[in-house]
Image: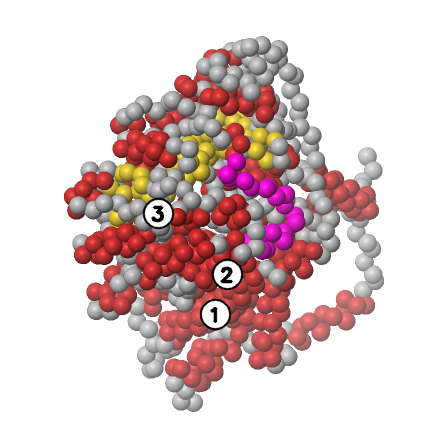
Amino acid sequence: MTALLTAAGPGERTAPPRPRRRPNLDRISFMLVFLVAPLVLFAVFVLLPFAQSAYYSLTSWGGYSDRLEWVGLQNFTQMLGDEVLLKSVRNSVVLALVVPTLTLTVAFAIACVVTTGGPSIGTIKGLRGSAFYRVASFFPYCVPAIVIGIIWAQVYDPSRGLLNGFLTAIGLDQFQSFPWLGNESTAMAASIFVIVWSLIGFYTILFIAAIKGIPAETYEAARLDGAGRFRIAMSVTLPQIASSFQTAYIYIGLVAVDSFVYMAALNAQGGPNYATLTMTQYLYNVAFFQGKFGYATAIGIVLALVTLVYAALVFGVFRLLRGKDGGDHA
Amino acid sequence: MPRPSRRTALNASATAAALCLVLAGCAGPGASPSESEGGAVTDKNPFGVAANTKVDIVVFDGGYGTEYAKYAAGLVEKQIGDGVTVQITPSNNLSQSLQPRFVGGTPPDSFTNDGADAIPITSIQDQLEDLGEFWDTKNYDGVKVSDAVFPGVKEVGEYDDAYLNANYVMTLFSLWYSQSLFEENGWKPPTTWSEMGDLCTEAKAKDKYLFTFGKEAAVYYQWLVLDSAIKQGGIDVIDDISNLEPGAWSNAAVKDVLGEMEGLIDDGCFVPGGAGTQFTQAQAQWSNDQDALFYYSGSWIESEMKEATADGFEMTAWPAPLLDAGDAALPFEAVQAGPAIPWAVPKAAASTAGGKEFLRALFSKEAASKFSELTLAPTVVKDTVPADGFGSSALASTMGVMEGAGDDLFSWVSNSYSGYYGIQDAPYWVSFLGGDITAQELIDAEEKLSAAAAADTSKPKKEYDYGK
């Protein structure tokens, strides 16, 4: 491949410079469709709203009139003393740390089992019936988040819910009427469980696809060297799909920081003592219930910053773990 | 025709992009309201609705539905004639659907600002028409509107000397129980908190609880606590809280009632698990399963639970208990009842005359009786509910309890103007009723929120004086 390219190289370089091609209709229409149109869409629907929000966040806009009063950085200084906001930031950080880690760990485990966890003789393959597990794990992802939230709110219902019904049936009477979503110490964990449950399937599929791209020889070599299934997963599979992991971590982190739909269905007001209030929920409440769109926009800007910091951290950590040149397969 | 060069193509696209930006900008704030030609002012048409006006009304489609508004729309079309039509648009989330219309200067001619997503009144205060003229006009029965309604109704909608809201539904806030269930068991509804405790013991003997609550509606018990504290300590209690006075929540009456409730919570008098239960399911524990004896709510409760009420459940209203009848500021019979479901007319509406004309129809006897018949709830218009309450025990007892209170009716819930209590403090009440935080911790949280609301200068504030 390389030899071919270098062989062709000098030939091209000696050729006289090509005359600049004159624009024709084909070229212009190509530019319009593939360059100008997306750029315009991007400017109108992404850049302009960004600029607008930045501006609104410096005003005390109430949201229902066209008058904007400039207040400078007041919205941002106000946040420092806003206890409920700080609580919501803390909750969002917890979500950003726990949800990706849990989801990706479980998804990775399932992906390994259904691709490489099969018999230790013969070709590398997954567990028997792995096609079924793959579909089963993906299933929750097909259900919309709001439906998942409503279903699980019923499952968690203290007196009629499935969960307490099951727990009391096996003799754990302390869970009689236990309010999973209404107790400050369990509300967040119960909500996180729902989010993780709903996301595992998608990331399992993502990892399965990445693992299928790893050459079978690598596995065979590892097995000849005497590596067990766990060792193979950690030392062969994981490094090879590290870039998929990184992408997944960032994407799921954004979903977790948002979490609006799940939380709105599980605990619309923010949970007991605001135990599950997310920044997105608070932003919505401040805008629509308190009529402070300027302040809400400022919260949105902080939310964007939190997201950026999260993405930067994930990039940084993965770079540290993998060394500078990456060196992974996928 | 010369071929366009790359440069001209780029220029053209840049211009197009700039044009798009400008156009997008124009879609935002700044469009001017369209003024309609006024019609002739006559006795029949006192606001001068112009011929062929299409009156645009947005109605909150909640527990009361929109049928009553359609009925009133028909009355307007009959009254004015001249090709005037009234368009009723139902909406479930007022603030999201009306926000762009307010910003764009094209709000409806009249709307109900109600429901969980109502627009905070402070956000649109300067964009609403003063309804003073409307209150002074005769309704379809030939009676001045302000005389046709219960006393105090007009004043509830007053902000900074302007009458911005015309509240329509008379709502009673009280405890609710099944008279038949109480008679069966030989129970008597209590008038004091200590009797409440005794009843709790008796209820437990029958495997029942005193109260139930749901996670979204924990705040109903805030209303119960404050109603009781007001009856004990006087109307100043709620004046101070509404005016965001420091220390208002530490008032002795509030503290003592909260203490009583904390005692009941600790004694297990609430159906367990309320903090995690959806509120209509919690309400069904009371109206259908009859696991709880009492529920605190507004008089909409009957129509809200229509589908989930046990047969023979005689839903009956009961005033909030007192701490000590001996030194209470108000008699036990005093209850909170006030007008709710605010109607308003935006200044920028295409036809403010049409909006007001619609309200004039609504505040007439024919439309008001229709409302009560459809929803089993009383309106603010007097003499529109027959003695049998259209066959509803709840409606009949609502009227009875309000009559029993006589001059000791007070009203504050529909006026939670400062926008923090009942909304921002709701999660703390969930924790309190769930037994996670103490009464003192709840008071501290309320004080903190109140101080923050007082310090917030971005919103206009109203001076409350419920005693006047």
Q: Nearer the viewer, residue A257 or A62?
A: A62
The chain holding disc 2 is: B
**Tag 1 and tag 2 share a subunit:** no
Number of residues whose C-alpha sits closer than 10 Å to that of mark 3, classed few (under 14), some (14–19) or many (20 or more): some
CB under 8 Å between callouts 1 and 2? no
Vertical placement of residue B307 versus B269, above or below: above
Q: Nearer the viewer, residue A229 or B64?
A: B64
Number of residues whose C-alpha sits closer than 10 Å to that of mark 2, classed few (under 14), some (14–19) or many (20 or more): some
**Tag 2 and tag 3 share a subunit:** yes
Query: The disc labelled 3 sits on which kind of residue?
Result: Ala
Q: Position of residue B238 (x, y in %)?
A: 49, 46
**First to last magenta residue range:** B450-468
Q: Nearer the viewer, mark 2 or mark 3?
A: 3
CB under 8 Å between callouts 2 and 3? no
| Residue B26 as seen in the image, left or right of residue B451 | right
Q: Which residue is mark 2?
A: B444
**Tag 3 and tag 1 share a subunit:** no
The chain holding disc 3 is: B
Quarter of the N terminus of chain B within the rendering: top right
| Residue at (58, 26) in percent of width and height | B131
Query: The disc labelled 2 sits on which kind of residue?
Result: Asp
| Residue A156 as seen in the image, left or right of residue B336 | left
Q: Nearer the viewer, residue B249 or B167?
A: B249
Q: Which residue is mark 1?
A: A98
Query: The disc labelled 1 sits on which kind of residue?
Result: Val
Q: Position of residue A166 (x, y in %)?
A: 25, 63
Could you say whether the residue bearing mark 2 is in a helix, strand or loop?
helix
Q: Toward which corner of the image does residue B268 lie, by quadrant? A: bottom left
